[in-house]
């Protein structure tokens, strides 16, 4: 059974067609990176998978269950899928600990003690044990994003979606967040990652998909995509990245 | 400056002597204070009961107006009509109509108490105002907050309860308090029903003596409640900001 199957997904915002027939399948424990210019549809695809955006056509199947079928309990589907956002989206009125325990307590029905013990373990694992009582505004961007990742992991998702999670960070804070994601990849987490960090994508991905104007134009192992891209568009995109000194 | 100018114009006016005698009779002020203060307790009681109800009904109305999708259109439309109507009708008219009309129906199970209907009137009117304040607060919370909450598998109701409303309410504490200061003052409108609250009591005293100092007593009592209320809110807002933004300001 695949972790995720995306079949012929179309998505428009009004007249603007953002996804024009996306097909993509992720096996368990697979890490797939989505690359492409801004506006190519990477973030929209992730939001569609998490059912934050309704799609116009196609199917999304999560571990054998069709998430886009009528009458599906979207909350149940979402509990199995974690998403981490570019802008962290932590809850500013809650301490770190409450940010992390809210989902497990209210959506999974864990007791406060169970949720806090789970949160405590995760915060310790990612070097945030001493931040549990802080409010998000008091943390650095890198710390906030690590808390956001921990908040998602506390739900023990089967699939993790990462939406340009380092794009809002100062350069010196990027590494600590990427390190966390690397560790998750080594731990066997199934991940679909939209990213501009090409070096990171090359290291961590089993497969890289190049999105262009709402379609997956090319996909393959990172070694092939980054060294011998077949499509002219992919070559142009990667050339611009190299020219900018980012690869 | 303006205050000094007003005082100068007033004290040099030809009628100043009569004015002073009419409004600033300190003996009457002291003598009538306990009586008017005890009538003022009714204002406080009306205010407290109405406020407690309004905080809940206004929130419910605001939430109804924020329900998405065509399914909830009739409910949303009803909420809009309600808010438009009760913000449009003068409060004093609502109090007069309900306060005199409802008891006149002579139906057993309809309460006859004018204070009861005065409270109902204030709740109806202020629910419409305060729901607008709540709604502005709800709309000021960025949609990404709801997305984050829903992505954790929380239902829409849970996202509203734990994530959106706490942030929304915090942001609207000052305008909310502003409306409650207005409500506190509007409890004086109940006097049109003949209910003996602070204003009615001072009217009675004024009519008996042709001296307006009693109004000054009532004014003092209203101000004595609203000013500390305003300072308390300022303090709450400042404390909240300090707690959340200490890192950013440092």
Image (cartoon, coloured by chain):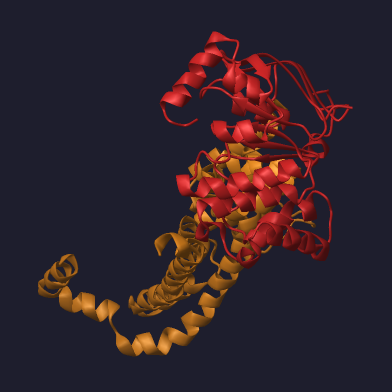
Chain colours: A red, B orange
Q: Position of residue B114 (x, y in %)?
A: 63, 62
Coordinates of residue A93 in the picture (x, y in percent): 58, 58
Q: Is residue A117 left or right of residue A90?
A: right
Q: Is residue B149 left or right of residue A155?
A: left
Residue B103 in view: no
Query: Left of A134 or right of it: where is A206?
Result: right
In this rendering, position of residue A22 left or right of residue A41: right
- Quarter occupied by residue B214: bottom left
Q: Estimate the x, y position of residue B193 in percent, counting from the top left.
A: 55, 61
Tell me, yes or no, if residue A192 can be seen here: yes
Give above or below for B191 relative to A141: below
How many numbered discs?
Answer: 0
Task: Tell me where residue A21 sits by quadrant.
Answer: top right
Question: Could you say which is closer to the camera, residue B95 or residue B167?
Answer: B167
Q: Kindly identify the residue that appears in the image at 47 percent across and 19 percent down.
A: A239
Closest to the observer, A204 or B32 = A204
Q: Residue at x 56, y 66 (%)?
A: B47
Q: Residue at the spot x=89%, y=27% of the render?
A: A1
Q: Is residue A109 above or below residue B202?
A: above
Answer above or below: position of A3 versus B233: above
**Which residue corresponds to the image point at 59% horizontal and 68% vertical from the top-left?**
B48
Quarter location, residue B41: bottom right
Looking at the image, residue B36 lies above or below residue B136: below
Q: Position of residue A176 (x, y in %)?
A: 57, 50
């Amino acid at each position: 059974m695949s972790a995720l199957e995306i079949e012929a997904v179309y998505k428009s915002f009004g007249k603007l067609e953002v996804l024009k027939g996306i097909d993509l399948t992720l096996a368990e424990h697979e890490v797939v990176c989505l690359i492409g210019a801004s506006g190519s549809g990477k973030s929209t695809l992730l939001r569609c998978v998490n059912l934050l955006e309704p799609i116009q056509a196609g199917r999304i199947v999560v571990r054998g269950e069709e998430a886009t079928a009528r009458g599906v309990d979207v909350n149940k589907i979402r509990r199995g899928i974690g998403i981490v956002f570019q802008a962290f989206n932590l809850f500013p009125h809650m301490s770190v600990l409450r940010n992390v325990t809210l989902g497990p307590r209210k959506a999974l029905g864990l007791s406060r003690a169970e949720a806090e013990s789970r949160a405590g373990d995760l915060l310790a694992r990612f070097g945030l044990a001493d931040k549990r009582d802080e409010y998000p505004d008091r943390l650095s961007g890198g710390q906030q994003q690590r808390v956001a990742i921990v908040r998602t992991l506390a739900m023990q998702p089967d699939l993790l979606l990462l939406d340009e999670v380092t794009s809002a960070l100062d350069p010196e804070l990027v590494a600590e967040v990427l390190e966390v994601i690397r560790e998750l990849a080594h731990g066997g987490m199934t991940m679909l990652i939209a990213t501009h960090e090409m070096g990171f994508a090359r290291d961590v991905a089993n497969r890289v998909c190049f999105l262009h104007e709402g379609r997956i134009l090319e996909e393959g192992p990172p070694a092939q995509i980054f060294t011998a891209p077949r499509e002219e568009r992919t070559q142009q995109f990667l050339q611009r990245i190299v020219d900018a000194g980012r690869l | 400056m303006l205050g000094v100018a007003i005082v100068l114009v007033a004290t040099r006016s030809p009628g100043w002597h009569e004015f002073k005698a009419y409004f600033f009779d300190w003996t009457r002020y002291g003598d009538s204070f306990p009586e008017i203060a005890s009538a003022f307790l009714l204002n406080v009681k009306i205010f407290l009961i109405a406020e407690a109800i309004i905080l809940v009904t206004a929130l419910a109305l605001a939430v109804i107006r924020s329900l998405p999708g065509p399914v909830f259109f009739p409910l949303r439309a009803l909420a809009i009509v309600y808010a438009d109507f009760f913000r449009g009708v003068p409060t004093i008219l609502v109090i007069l109509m309900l306060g005199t009309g409802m008891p006149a129906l002579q139906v057993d199970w309809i309460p006859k108490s004018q204070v009861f209907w005065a409270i109902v009137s204030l709740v109806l009117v202020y629910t419409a105002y305060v729901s607008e304040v709540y709604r502005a607060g709800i709309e000021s919370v960025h949609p990404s907050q709801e997305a984050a909450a829903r992505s954790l598998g929380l239902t829409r109701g849970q996202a509203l309860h734990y994530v959106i409303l706490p942030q929304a309410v915090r942001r609207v504490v000052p305008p909310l308090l502003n409306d409650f200061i207005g409500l506190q003052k509007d409890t004086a409108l109940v006097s049109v029903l003949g209910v003996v609250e602070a204003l009615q009591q001072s009217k009675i005293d004024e009519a008996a003596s042709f001296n307006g100092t009693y109004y000054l007593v009532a004014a003092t009592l209203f101000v004595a409640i609203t000013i500390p209320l305003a300072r308390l809110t300022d303090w709450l807002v400042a404390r909240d900001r300090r707690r959340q933004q200490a890192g950013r300001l440092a």
